[in-house]
Image (tube, grey):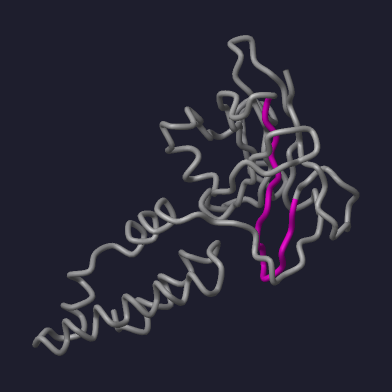
């Protein structure tokens, strides 16, 4: 693998970051590779020593906050991304059914957690991080109850987000995704709207 190929693939893995943050990491790893080459390593060896691109990206995405890109316009489009169901479970946890395009990686879906009915943001991350976060006691798993035991249907995958209450009053979510070079959101507002809604809320 060449340096350019490495950086291109890393850039794809970090697509949920802002352009500024993504470029900072790409510049950093470009310098690391160049330093190894200057120390006498050939390009392929230098890249091999850095490690697996997926693991590198995963570590980066866990370490820095992510948020919807403020320089683009997101459109509400429930055919692409949606919260199709939400309810409070018997054990007090919250369940949100999330619809995303088939084959989408959880790290490429941004989720904004809200702390009240008005949609006041609490924090923003990606579904992959939330799934692995012990602090939030949350899991994201395929919704095999959908469509007779198959969580993938008609070009979409369905997941259950199951989590403890993350704010005093309950919790809500908004969802964001870049899909086929377009930006979509699910914020519980009118289809084709570019104005962010209050989100999908579950209160006490």
Relative vertical location of residue 152 with respect to residue 73 in this rendering, above or below: above
Q: How many marks?
A: 0
Q: Main secondary structure of the magenta part?
A: strand
59 magenta-colored: no
Residue 147 location, x and y as percent? 70, 31
Q: Residue at x 49, y 31 (%)?
A: 136
Residue 90, located in which quarter of the rendered image?
top right
Residue 119 location, x and y as percent? 76, 41
Q: Residue at x 39, y 60 (%)?
A: 57
178 magenta-colored: yes
Q: Between 72 and 158, which is closer to the camera in this rendering?
A: 72
Residue positioned most to the top: 90
Is residue 49 shown left or right of residue 78?
Answer: left
Q: Which residues are magenta?
A: 170-185
Q: Between 84 and 24, which is closer to the camera in this rendering?
A: 24
Residue 202 location, x and y as percent? 73, 26
Q: Residue at x 73, y 46 (%)?
A: 154
Residue 149, located in which quarter of the rendered image?
top right
Q: Between 157 and 113, which is closer to the camera in this rendering?
A: 113
Relative vertical location of residue 137 with respect to residue 58 in this rendering, above or below: above
> Which quadrant, please, contains the C terminus?
top right
Relative vertical location of residue 34 with respect to residue 164 in this rendering, above or below: below
Is residue 48 shown left or right of residue 79?
Answer: left
Q: Residue at x 82, y 42 (%)?
A: 188
Q: Between 179 and 59, which is closer to the camera in this rendering?
A: 59
Residue 30, located in which quarter of the rendered image?
bottom left
> Which quadrant, please, contains the N terminus?
bottom left
Relative vertical location of residue 147 with respect to residue 62 in this rendering, above or below: above
Residue 91 location, x and y as percent? 58, 11
């Amino acid at each position: 693998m060449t340096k350019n190929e490495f950086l291109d693939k890393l850039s794809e893995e970090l697509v949920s970051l802002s352009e500024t943050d993504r470029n900072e990491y790409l510049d950093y790893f470009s310098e690391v590779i160049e330093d190894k080459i200057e120390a006498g390593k050939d390009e392929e060896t230098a890249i091999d020593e850095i490690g697996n691109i997926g693991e590198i990206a995963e570590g980066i995405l866990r370490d820095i906050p992510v948020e919807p890109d403020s320089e683009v316009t997101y459109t509400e489009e429930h055919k692409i991304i949606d919260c199709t169901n939400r309810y409070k479970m018997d054990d007090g946890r919250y369940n949100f059914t999330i619809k995303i395009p088939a084959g989408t990686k959880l790290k490429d879906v941004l989720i904004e957690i809200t702390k009240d009915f008005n949609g006041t943001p609490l924090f923003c991350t990606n579904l992959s991080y939330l799934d692995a976060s012990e602090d939030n006691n949350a899991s994201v798993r395929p919704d095999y109850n959908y469509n007779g035991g198959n969580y993938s249907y008609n070009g979409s995958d369905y997941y259950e987000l199951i989590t403890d209450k993350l704010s005093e009053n309950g919790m809500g979510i908004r969802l964001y995704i870049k899909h086929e070079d377009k930006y979509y959101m699910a914020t519980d507002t009118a289809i084709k709207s570019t104005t962010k809604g209050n989100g999908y809320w579950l209160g006490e």
